[in-house]
């Protein structure tokens, strides 16, 4: 993208003998962006949505996904277990 889209910091452990293909997924806009869902006049600030998502997963533990089941140390153990020996 010639610097137009900046990659999110992430780590990939690629163990397949095949080539790796990346597919970009754009989840969160700039934190100052005001979003208006189609068909409504409701204005949403993306920072508020990101904070709500974070709180639902890590604080109240009501959010969707496996992330709420993991603690940092468990996540690190999972990553280490995937490394080639």
Image: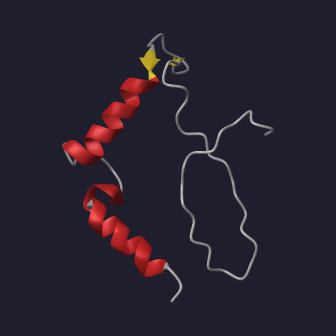
Choose top left, top right, bottom left or bottom right for residue 12. bottom right
Scheme by which the image is coloured: secondary structure
Please say if 7 is above or below 4: below
- Residue drawn where x is 54% and y is 60% of the image: 11
**Where residue 28 appears, x then y in whole percent?**
52, 34
Q: For the N terminus, give its image quadrant.
A: top right
Choose top left, top right, bottom left or bottom right for residue 67. bottom left
Please say if 31 is above or below 84: above
Q: Nearer the viewer, residue 83 or 68?
A: 83
**Where residue 68 appears, x then y in whole percent?**
28, 55
**Where residue 70 appears, x then y in whole percent?**
28, 62
Q: How many numbered dots are placed on residues in this image?
A: 0
Q: Nearer the viewer, residue 50 or 73?
A: 73
Q: Residue furthest front?
A: 85
Q: Residue furthest right?
A: 2
Q: Nearer the viewer, residue 2 or 29?
A: 2
- Residue drawn where x is 60% and y is 40% of the image: 26
Q: Nearer the viewer, residue 4 or 39?
A: 4
- Residue drawn where x is 43% and y is 71% of the image: 79
**Where residue 56 appears, x then y in whole percent?**
27, 41
Please say if 67 is above or below 63: below
Query: Residue 77 vs residue 6: left or right?
Result: left
Query: Residue 39 vs residue 48: left or right?
Result: right
Q: Residue furthest bottom?
A: 85
Query: Residue 24 vs residue 61: left or right?
Result: right
Q: Residue furthest left?
A: 60
- Residue drawn where x is 80% and y is 38% of the image: 2
């Amino acid at each position: 993208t010639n610097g137009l889209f900046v990659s999110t910091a992430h780590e990939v452990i690629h163990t397949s003998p095949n080539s790796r293909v990346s597919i970009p997924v754009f989840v969160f806009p700039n934190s100052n962006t005001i979003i208006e869902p189609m068909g409504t006049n409701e204005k949403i600030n993306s920072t508020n949505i990101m904070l709500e998502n974070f709180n639902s997963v890590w604080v109240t533990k009501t959010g969707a996904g496996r992330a709420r089941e993991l603690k940092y140390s468990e996540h690190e153990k999972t990553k280490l277990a995937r490394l080639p020996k």
